[in-house]
Image (tube, helix red, strand yellow):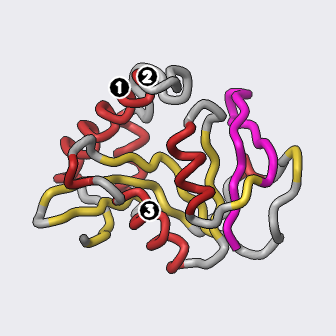
Amino acid sequence: MNIRKSTPADLPAILDIYRAAREFMQQNGNPNQWKQNHPPQDAVEADIRSGESYVCECDGQVLAVFYFSTTPDPTYAKIDGAWLNNQPYAVVHRIARAQTPAAKGIGAFCLNWCYQQLPNTRIDTHKDNIPMVRLLENLGFQQCGIIWLANGEERLAFHRA
């Protein structure tokens, strides 16, 4: 498996992965996290332009996508709870994998790669996203509290340091 920055040529594969992830969430008890068209194509394109969109591929096939940045996330400035530390951190958003057997375990691979880039990593997820909550806990992320998105929705905040 190989992780690299996304390019505009990856857009169709990325959008397909996000579509499949939305369907998976809706079918597995998490219908509210990524409604209809989230993340929107313009946001994905902006992530690619900013150099903060990454894909994980195997044998030339894109199997996962995620946003990775070392810029502080404004939604993490206020937390009902407490982060593990106040040191510079990386943030992961919009992580999703293809719904194929070849992508099994790729979420852990991607999150471990992020942690290797900066071993102080934060991420958030919807309370109903039980598969992600379990994955984060299995990888050593600690639930630190609740943060709120710009639209007012709350998310469980996780941190691994």
Q: Position of residue 40 (x, y in %)?
A: 40, 32
Residue 150 lies in quadrant: top right
Position of residue 49 relative to residue 125, above or below, is below
Picture residue at 27% right of the left edge, 45% below the top:
98
Tell me the quadrant of the picture where the N terminus can be found. bottom left
The CA distance from mark 3 to mark 1 is 20 Å
- Mark 3 or mark 1, earlier in chain: 1
Which amino acid is tagged 1? Glu
Q: Nearer the viewer, residue 105 or 6?
A: 105
Which amino acid is tagged 3? Ala
Q: Which residues are magenta?
A: 144-161
Q: Position of residue 20 (x, y in %)?
A: 29, 33
Magenta highlight on residue 106: no
Q: Which mark is residue 26?
A: 2
The CA distance from mark 2 to mark 1 is 5 Å
SS category of the residue bearing label 1: helix
Q: Residue furthest right?
A: 81
Name the residue that disc number 3 marks.
108
Name the residue that disc number 1 marks.
23
Magenta highlight on residue 147: yes
Q: Residues within 10 Å of mark 3 (few under 14, many from 20)?
A: some
